[in-house]
Image (cartoon, rainbow, N blue to C red):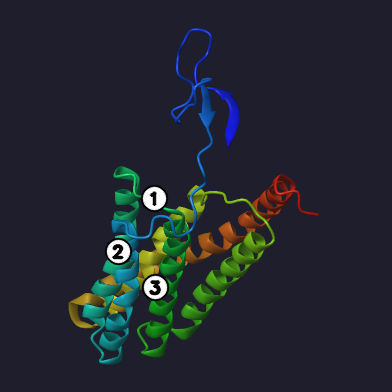
Amino acid sequence: PRVPLPCSDLRGRSQCRRPSDARGYCAAVPSEGLFSRVWTVPNFLTVTRLALLPVYVVWLSDGRYVAGAWFLGALMWTDFFDGWIARRFNQTSELGKVLDPIADRAIFGVGVVAAMAYHAFPWWFGALVLLREGSIAVLMTGATLLGMERFPVTTLGKRATFLMMCAVSWLILGAGGGGWRVAGWMGWTAAVPGLLLSYWTFFQYVPLVRSHLSSGRAAKRLP
């Protein structure tokens, strides 16, 4: 199939990098499917992070809070590394866009649940964190299924995530006792503002989701 877009203007400058036919019109490029680029380094790192998650749970169950905290921190912060690789070396994929956020939420959720189960921090704190994470997951998943177009995470949302990742790791580290108790104090200094900011951003996402759901359904001509 061809699309009626000339590959050059009247001055001969290229307007399109797609293959062109004899008439100078661009050949249509098929859209990338979900499984068209599976074997990429970022996808491998994402799957590896998920596969290593049971190691963290086992260490926490044995009371090895210090090792568990460092390991969980590595699993969470590796997300920035595989994202950089995807952008730097053009290894983004539709599968990665779906799999990466699922892995992030799974790692963070299991990290919090295990820390609650093995008394690394108070249950009420973990319950508040899980309530917010569960609510945002239901909101985004439901809206996406109904036709919402994707939109990037807000700056405040990124800051809230950063604070909560630090808080959870540091609180678990502080549960190791001894000199590591300092990390626990640091964890609470990040946990309180991080928790408040995460709930604030949740309420900010509601009108954004409503707007992008409306525009997404209109673009897809859904009723």
Instruction: Say if residue 197 shows up in the picture.
Output: yes
Q: Nearer the viewer, mark 1 or mark 3?
A: 1
Residue 214: horizontal and vertical position, in percent? Answer: 73, 50
Q: Identify the residue shown where x is 29% and y is 61%.
A: 78
Q: Which residue is mark 3?
A: 107
Q: Which residue is mark 1?
A: 92
Q: Residue furthest left?
A: 179
Q: Is residue 172 left or right of residue 205?
A: left
Q: Residue furthest right?
A: 223
Q: Identify the residue shown where x is 29% and y is 45%.
A: 89
Q: Nearer the viewer, mark 3 or mark 2?
A: 2
Which quadrant holds residue 163?
Answer: bottom left
Residue 113: horizontal and vertical position, in percent? Answer: 43, 82
Q: Identify the residue shown where x is 37% and y is 68%.
A: 167
The tag earlier along the polypeptide, 1 or 2, is 2
Q: Which residue is mark 2?
A: 45
- CA gap between label 3 and label 2 equals 13 Å
